[in-house]
C-alpha cells in the first residue's frame, strides 16, 4: 500500500533571502571558529579535506541541469533532514580531528578513493538525469523515465554516490567516530529513496516496470 502524500504545491523558488542569510551566518560563524581553533587551516590534512569538499561542490554545479519550474514536490521534510545531517557530517570530522589528530595514510587513501568514486557516480547520475534532477522528491508534468547511463543498472546513482562520499569523507581525517553520523545519513538516504520510489510509482507511468528491471543502488544486488 502506498503512503499518502497529501496536497502538494509546485515548487516556487528558493527559501526567503533572510532564511538563507541566517543559515550562512550560522554556518559561517561556526566554521570560522572551528577552523581557527588550533590553527587547523595550516594543517595539510584539513586543507585536503576542504579542497575535496570544494571540488565536489563545483563538480555538482557543473553537472546540474535541473529545472524546478512546474515540479510538484513531496516529502519536503526529507530535504531538511538530509541538509541537517550533511552539515553535521561536514563539521564532525574536523572537530574529531582537532581533538585526536590521527594520521593513518592508508585510511586517508581509502577515504579519498571512496569520496572520488562517490563524486564521480553522483555527477554521472545528475548529468544523465538532466532537467529531472532535483534536490526534492518531485515529479513534472512531462516527466519521463531516464534509463540511460547508470540508470540502466541502478535507479538511484546520485544517492549511491552520496553514500560512498558519506563513508569516505570522515576517513580523509581518520575520524572514525564521525562514521556514526555517516550511518545516520545513510539511513536517511535509504528512507528517502524508498519514499521516492513509492511517490514515482504513483505519479510516473511505467516506473513500476522500471523498478522490476533495475536495482536501487548496488548493481545486481539491491
Image (tube, grey):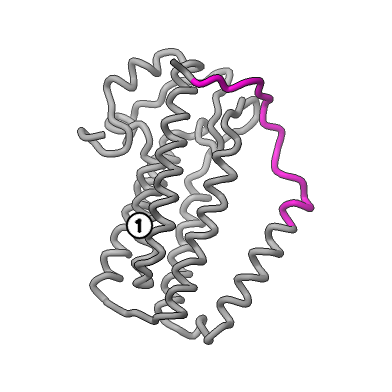
**Tally of marks:** 1
Quadrant where the N terminus sits is top left
Secondary structure, magenta segment, majority class: loop
Q: Position of residue 207 (x, y in %)?
A: 40, 18
Q: Position of residue 204 (x, y in %)?
A: 47, 17
Quick one: SS at disc 1? helix
Q: Is residue 73 above or below residue 25?
A: above
Q: Nearest the camera: 94 or 52?
A: 94
Q: Which picture quadrant has residue 69?
A: top right
Q: Nearer the viewer, residue 22 or 205?
A: 22
Q: Position of residue 22 (x, y in %)?
A: 74, 58
The residue that appears at 48% across and 66% down in the rendered structure is 92
Q: Is residue 197 left or right of residue 213?
A: right
What residue sits 66% from the left and 20% below the top?
7
Write down the quadrant of residue 194 in the picture. Answer: top left
| 75 drawn magenta | no
Query: Would you name the residue on which mark 1 appears?
Result: 167
Amino acid at each position: 500500500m502506498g503512503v499518502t502524500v497529501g496536497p502538494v504545491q509546485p515548487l516556487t523558488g528558493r527559501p526567503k533571502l533572510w532564511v538563507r542569510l541566517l543559515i550562512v551566518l550560522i554556518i559561517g560563524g561556526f566554521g570560522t571558529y572551528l577552523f581557527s581553533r588550533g590553527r587547523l587551516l595550516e594543517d595539510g590534512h584539513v586543507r585536503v579535506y576542504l579542497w575535496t569538499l570544494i571540488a565536489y561542490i563545483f563538480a555538482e554545479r557543473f553537472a546540474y541541469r535541473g529545472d524546478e519550474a512546474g515540479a510538484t514536490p513531496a516529502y519536503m521534510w526529507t530535504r531538511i533532514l538530509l541538509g541537517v545531517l550533511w552539515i553535521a557530517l561536514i563539521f564532525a570530522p574536523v572537530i574529531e580531528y582537532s581533538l585526536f589528530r590521527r594520521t593513518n595514510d592508508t585510511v586517508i587513501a581509502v577515504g579519498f578513493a571512496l569520496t572520488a568514486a562517490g563524486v564521480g557516480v553522483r555527477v554521472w547520475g545528475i548529468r544523465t538525469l538532466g532537467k529531472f534532477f532535483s534536490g526534492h522528491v518531485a515529479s513534472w508534468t512531462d516527466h519521463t523515465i531516464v534509463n540511460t547511463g547508470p540508470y540502466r543498472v541502478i535507479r538511484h546513482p546520485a544517492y549511491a554516490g552520496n553514500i560512498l562520499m558519506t563513508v569516505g569523507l570522515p576517513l580523509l581525517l581518520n575520524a572514525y567516530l564521525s562514521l556514526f553520523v555517516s550511518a545516520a545519513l545513510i539511513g536517511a538516504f535509504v528512507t528517502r529513496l524508498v519514499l521516492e520510489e513509492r511517490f514515482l510509482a504513483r505519479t510516473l507511468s511505467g516506473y513500476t516496470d522500471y523498478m522490476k528491471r533495475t536495482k536501487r543502488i548496488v548493481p545486481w544486488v539491491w
